[in-house]
Image (tube, coloured by chain):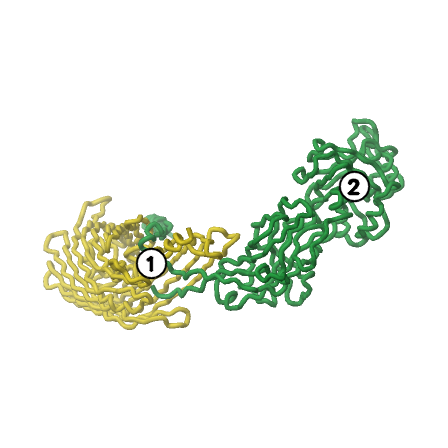
Amino acid sequence: MKLSPMLPRFLAIAALFFSISSCSENLDSSGVCAVLCTQIGGDVQNVTLDAIVIDTTVQSLSGLGTEPGLLLANRPDTLDTRVVVRFDSLPEKFLPAGDTSQAIAQVDSAYLQLQIDTLSIKGNAPVTIEAYDVDTTANDTSTAAVLALFRPDRFISSQTFTRAQLTDTLKYFIANDVVLSKIQNKLPLRIGLRATGTGSSQMRIISTEGGVPPIMLFRATPDTATKPLTVTLFSKTPVGQAILAANLSDYTVIAKAPPQASPTILAVGGLPPRRVYFRFNIPSSIIDSSTVVRATLLLNQLPNSSLDPTDTVRVLPQVVLAGRVVTDPQKAAQIIAGISADTLTLRPGDAGLVNVELARAVALWHIQQPDTLPRAIVLKPVIEGISPLELRFSSSEDAVAALRPKLRISYTKQVPLGLP
Amino acid sequence: MRKRHLVATALFTLAFTSRVQAQGALSLEGLGYPTGQLSARAEGTGGGVGDFDALSLVAPAALAGVGSSALFFQYSPEFRKVTTSSGSASTTTARFPLVAGVLPMGQDWTLGLSSSTFLDRSLETSLQRVQVVGTPTDTVTLTERNKVLGAINDVRLALAWSTNPIFRIGVGAHVFSGSNRITFSQLFPDSARYTSTSQNGRISYAGFAASLGLEFHPSRAIGFSINGRKGGDLRAESGDTAIGSARIPDHYSASVTFEGIPGAVISARVAHDAWSSLTNLSSSGIQAFDGWDTGVGIEASGPRIIQRIITVRAGARFRTLPFGYPAPCAPPIPTGSSCTNPERVSETSFAAGLGVPLTRERASLDLSLQRASRSAADIKERGFILSIGLRVSP
């Protein structure tokens, strides 16, 4: 087939045509809007509602060992928390340099390597960390059973650190003979750590969930040409529950915590961690027929000076995803999703009005029926279980009506987009 | 402090309630900008030759002079600058205002099917205003963004008859259709605290009209043309709901062409559009004005480049745009009123153009550049419209 000699010219013209036509538009006339534009949308309407149907404090059931940090604290009269790390699988052989594999017959320089969140350290006095053998056949999640094992006959070792020695990577030496005994008897090594000392002390050790879990290192021979052995956390129990077992490879045990708020007060945080569940009744004329541009939960904070009242706690609201079939607030408060990356930073000792922004939650409620997505939120610390600090708020049972939680909604009506 | 803020808000509101539905440019008031329905060739002569041009959509009789079958496509971006006392804005609007096909049927008849942009409404504006959201002292700067895309188009099926070069007659049936897609957003600065909103709307238009045109060339040197279009109803709907109706503007034009100078064609045209019939298609009282559209131009054989004779064109045009600018009333304005004083928007254009034959007369490229000046009240608007038309005879 012979192509027409005109074809290249046609193509060239077409190319020119379309290259010009592909130029992007710029229709934005904003520069003259001060004169040539006018307000189209209506004014924002603001209304404050007594819209709280349920507000209650519930336990966080995220589970023992799921916290990203292990709180080791010794605050006389207020707080005593211990840390448990499990090494249920210990090596029985090692490979000497230039030799073949041999059974471990000695242990030297055994220590735990702990990553410390140095910003979390409280107290300037020297702190003594004691280690106990907390291996037991009792229920894995029994706090009482574990606490009972912090006794002299279970004592492994102790080491005292000055404040300056508490660096981000802490070497905590433990008795070599205890490790060797566990290896040779094929027993799990479960170590409970407890802080003691003349003054208060508190620190947070990064956990498995935090990304840098504690590990144990030791030498099976004095020969330094042979690398030390590294043992990672592992929990064999509870049998058949791999997720729970993984969580329990390291966890915090609460021996003593500050007194919790009364049931008529809403409490967020603390140890064990708690959340507040709110369910709202918002008029459908606002949710369905208007566009909510801002929704604010107005809370009255009550001062809690029991522990570190000027420290900050970051909290955030999360929307409850549990449908109508989940009627128990305790359970519903566990089925949640984030709606905002912007956290609220509060101090337990403060008092007064606190605004919790919920515009994104309302936007979700606008597109979902209440049966599917209840008009409910949970207020919780950003990270639960790593701080003893507890925020307190007036509930809807407060004697003073003005102090009860309220919902303020700012909304606009739809604009008729019709003829000019 | 709070009192001062309230006073400022009141003044702000008062100032803007007097500017009803202005849309970021004088030429975009009301239902939009009338592109003129002229080909690039006709635009290059200030519209003077439009009534004798088969590819323009204003004169059905002109189809008879097309000679051979042809396809035509036109692209006309406009580079516009609007200047007000408080600032200026530069925009680029891409338009494809005309596509046409012409088919001679035997010796005497010619059929044409064309589509052109009747009123183009492509705009985007952003207005910032202070809004109380929450407590009375909790204010935020809200940005209202309004974007409208779309046009009312005129699709014409025309038939022309001519047995000799002296007299031509043509009739056309017009269907007006199209839509405006509207996106209105209210944007708040802090997404963690506020939720921005967005609304979408669509207005569709449908209407009918008929046109008739006559062309008379008593001699080779001179020709006359008169044309008219009678408008029918134009309905506007949003979804399935009728939201307004009006009459498509009647349009009349008369033209004369003089070819007594060898190699040159001088033409003049005057047209009248009864745009006021569209006033009813406004929810805010935008007023449309009847207007005259006059133009004069010359088309002449120019230099020979690469063995092709280039046609050069020049022209001037003056017209009144359909929709008035709602200028604020002179003070004192009663509190709470939205008094406006609609002003006509006039447009003066100067144009130049080229016609380049391609591929042994089987294709041609028409280029024109118009400089249009529009004004009303103390607002100035300047637009450069580059039109590129490609005609191909298969």
Nearer to us of marks 1 and 2 is 1
Distance between mark 1 and mark 2 Cα atoms: 71 Å
Dot 2: few (<14), some (14–19), or many (≥20) neighbours within 10 Å?
many
The residue to which callout 2 is attached is: A193
Q: Is A109 or B112 nearer to us in this picture?
A: A109
Question: Which element type, helix, strand or loop, lies under badge 1?
Answer: helix
Question: Which element type, helix, strand or loop, lies under badge 2?
Answer: strand
Q: Quadrant of residue A201?
A: top right
Q: Quadrant of the C terminus of chain B?
A: bottom left
Residue A394 can be seen in this image? yes
The residue to which callout 1 is attached is: B14
Dot 1: few (<14), some (14–19), or many (≥20) neighbours within 10 Å?
some
Location of residue A103 in the rendering, given as x and y in whole percent from the top left corner: 87, 35
Chain A representation colour: green
Chain B representation colour: yellow
Q: Name the disc covering residue A248, or none.
A: none
Residue at point 78%, 44% (across, down): A84
